[in-house]
Image: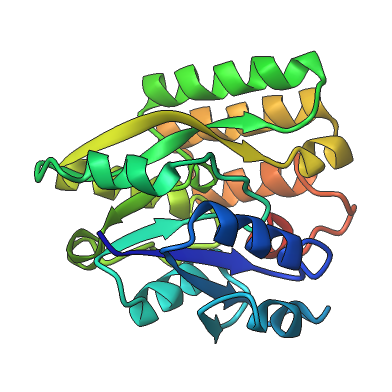
Amino acid sequence: MAISIIIPVLNEGALIQKSLRRLRERAPEAEIIVADGTSADGTVDLAAGLCDRLVQTKANRAVQMNAGARIARADVLWFLHADAKVPPGALTEIEQALQDRQVVGGFFRIRLSGKNSIYRLTDSFGHYAGLLLRMRCGDHGFFCRREIFAQIDGFPELDLMEDVEFFRKLRRAGRVVVIPKRIVVSARRYEQIGPLRLTLAYGLIATLYFFGAPLRLLDRIYRRHCCREPACPPARSASY
């Protein structure tokens, strides 16, 4: 089963080469596509020799992922963040899940890097809150059949919560499975903002979104509690 991996990036020069080499080792058969949001730190040049295809768009994660999907050659699309460490055998797990034609896609469980005990609490809280609220974020490594991606019109090109909206559309299209193997997600943003503060902020945003709060309110909360700088840039650019 052919799989295309699509990685949206923005100014990831510090880690992109190490990340792509590690991904190639874990998923040697996959097509790797880097979707760059017009980085200014040399990310494109650093990634060029380590991926199969590269596309550039404006800095908006949904736009970037949709652009990557359009040039993908495989029948299965797998969306990963640049700092994700995928588990061994991940491609096999995806292939086995999609043997069932009723399954339209799925996601992995995640584990935050770092030894701080609050990260283990965050791992569990995020998983069970996601089950309760029926939502998942993009760091879970969404994968889906290409025809289903086209059927649901891909990622809605929003500045915030585009991954959650995509997940909702995917669930409406058919059965979505969870792979228990963990993707290790970098805790760098938690270290920058503060683990407890960011966990609570994300939880608040998810809860308000579930109850239909307007995106402008969620954006204000994001800018105030999830950004490093007092003058936060546009939400999508700040969230990589």
Q: x%, y% of residue 34? A: 56, 73
Check the picture and name the quadrant holding the N terminus.
bottom left
Task: Residue 90: name its quadrant.
Answer: top left
Q: Residue at x 81, y 22 (%)?
A: 115
Q: Residue at x 90, y 52 (%)?
A: 230
Q: x%, y% of residue 18? A: 74, 61
Q: Residue at x 29, y 64 (%)?
A: 2
Pick the residue in front: 19 or 65: 19
Pick the residue in front: 150 or 2: 2
Query: Does residue 50 appear to the left or right of 198 in the view shown?
Result: left
Query: Does residue 119 appear to the left or right of 69 in the view shown?
Result: right
Task: Residue 236: name its quadrant.
Answer: bottom right
Q: x%, y% of residue 31? A: 43, 70
Pick the residue in front: 231 or 51: 51
178 over 18 or under it: above or below: above
Check the picture and name the quadrant holding the C terminus.
bottom right
14 over 83 or under it: above or below: below
